[in-house]
Image: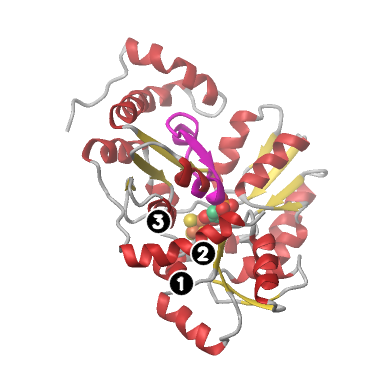
Amino acid sequence: MGVEPAFTPDVARATEGLYAKVATIIPRVEWAVHAPLIAEINRLKREKNAVILAHNYMTPEIFHCVGDFAGDSLALAREAARTDAKVIVQAGVHFMAETSKILSPEKTVLIPDMRAGCSLASSISGADVRLLKQKYPSLPVVTYVNTSAEVKAESDICCTSGNAVAVVEAIARDFGVDTVIMIPDKYLARNVAAKTGVKVITWEGACEVHERFTAAEIRDYRAAHPGITVLAHPECPPDVVAEADFAGSTAAMIAYVGSHKPRRVVMVTECSMSDNVAAENPDVDFIRPCNLCPHMKRITLEGILHSLRTMTHEVVVDPVVAARARAPIDRMLAVQ
Ligand code: 13P
Ligand code: SF4
C-alpha cells in the first residue's frame, strides 16, 4: 500500500476544478475526505493507462470526479468496445464488468468489489435458458444485459433498457415471428410489450430497487407537488410506468431533464441518479425518493483506489463462454 493520501494545499488546488462540478451537492467539509482519494485515483489512471467507466448510479464524487466516461449500460458497453486504454475499471456492477471483458478480451478489466451483483443477474442461469429454449424452440431469446456471461451465451440478442423495443422488433423481424422470449426482467418485458405489437414471454426476475416503487407513491408525489414531472425507469412495475410522464433508461431520463428543464422533477430510480443530475441542473428542483441499490453502493472511492493500486479484482470470463456471449452483444450493438 502507498502512503495514505492527505488533503494538502497541493491536493486542494489540483482538485478545485473538480469540486466546482459537485459544489452544489457535496459540502466542503466532505470534500476534504474525497479530494485526496480523487487526486490519487486520477494520477494512477494516467500511470497505468486505465479508464474508469462509471454507471449513472455511482455516487457524485465517483460519477463527476474520477469517471472518464459515464452513462447507462448501453453507453458503457459501447465505450468498453471502443476505448484504447489497457485497463478498464468498472465503476458499476459485475455484469457490466463482464460485458466489458467480453467486448475487450485483450484488456484487463477490474471491478473494485466482486460482491457488486444484481438481483436480475442472479435470477437466472444458463441451464434455465436452455430449458426455455427447449420449451419454445422456434422463438428468439432476447436477454437483458443485466445477466451473467453464461446466460448471454445462450441468447440470440441482448438488449438494454435504452434499446429494448428496437431490439425486440428487430429480432422478431429477423426470425419472422410475432413472439419473443425476453429474460429475465418481467417488468421490463411487460413495459416493452406495451410499446410494440410483438408478444413477449418472460421470466420471474425483477430489480430489487425498482420493484419497490408503487403507483400510489407516484400519485402521492403528484398530490404533494402539483405540476411535478415524473420520470421512471422501465424496470419499475407497469402500473408505476403508467403513472409516469416518461419512462426510459438512466441516460434517457438524464437527457429528458437536460432538454425539457422541468421546474420540478422526481426520478423514479436509484438515489444517486438525482444527485448526479442535480449537480448539472441547478435550476431544476429534484424531489428525491431514495431506493438505494446495495450492489452499486459497494463501489467507493476507497475501493477504486485499492483496485488501481493492486490491480484487483480482475474479471475473467471463460474464453469459450465469452466468444458465445459476444455474438448477442454485437448483434445488439448493430441494432439502430
Ligand atoms: P440502464 O441501462 O438504464 O443504465 O440501467 C441499468 C440498471 O442496472 C438499472 O437498474
Ligand atoms: Fe441490478 Fe436493480 Fe441494482 Fe440495477 S438497480 S444493478 S437492476 S439490482
Q: Secondary structure at mark 2?
A: helix
Secondary element under disc 3, as helix, strand or loop, is: helix
- Label 3 Cα crowd, 10 Å radius (few <14 / some 14-19 / many 20+): many
Residue 79 placement (x, y as % from top left): 49, 43
Q: Position of residue 47 (x, y in %)?
A: 28, 27
| Sequence-first disc among 3 and 2 | 3
CB contact under 8 Å: marks 1 and 3:
no
Tag 3 residue: 102
At a point 39% along the width and 14% down the height, the residue shown is 14
- In the rendered structure, the answer to whether residue 167 lies left or right of residue 305 reads right
Q: CA distance from mark 3 to mark 2?
A: 11 Å
Tell me which amino acid carries mark 1.
Ser
Q: Position of residue 41 (x, y in %)?
A: 33, 29
Q: Nearer the viewer, residue 311 or 293?
A: 311
**Circle 1: is it few (<14), some (14-19), or many (20+) Cα within 10 Å?**
some
Instruction: Please tell me whether mark 1 or mark 3 is closer to you in this view.
Output: 3
The magenta stretch spans which residues?
A: 56-77
Residue 325 makes an appearance in the image: yes
Which numbered mark, 2 or 1, is in the foreground of this view? 2
In the rendered structure, does residue 151 fall within the stretch colored magenta?
A: no
Q: Residue at x 62, y 29 (%)?
A: 280
Residue that protrudes farthest toward the bottom in the picture: 135
Residue 328 is tagged as 2
Alpha-carbon distance for marks 2 and 1?
A: 19 Å
The residue where tag 1 is placed is 123
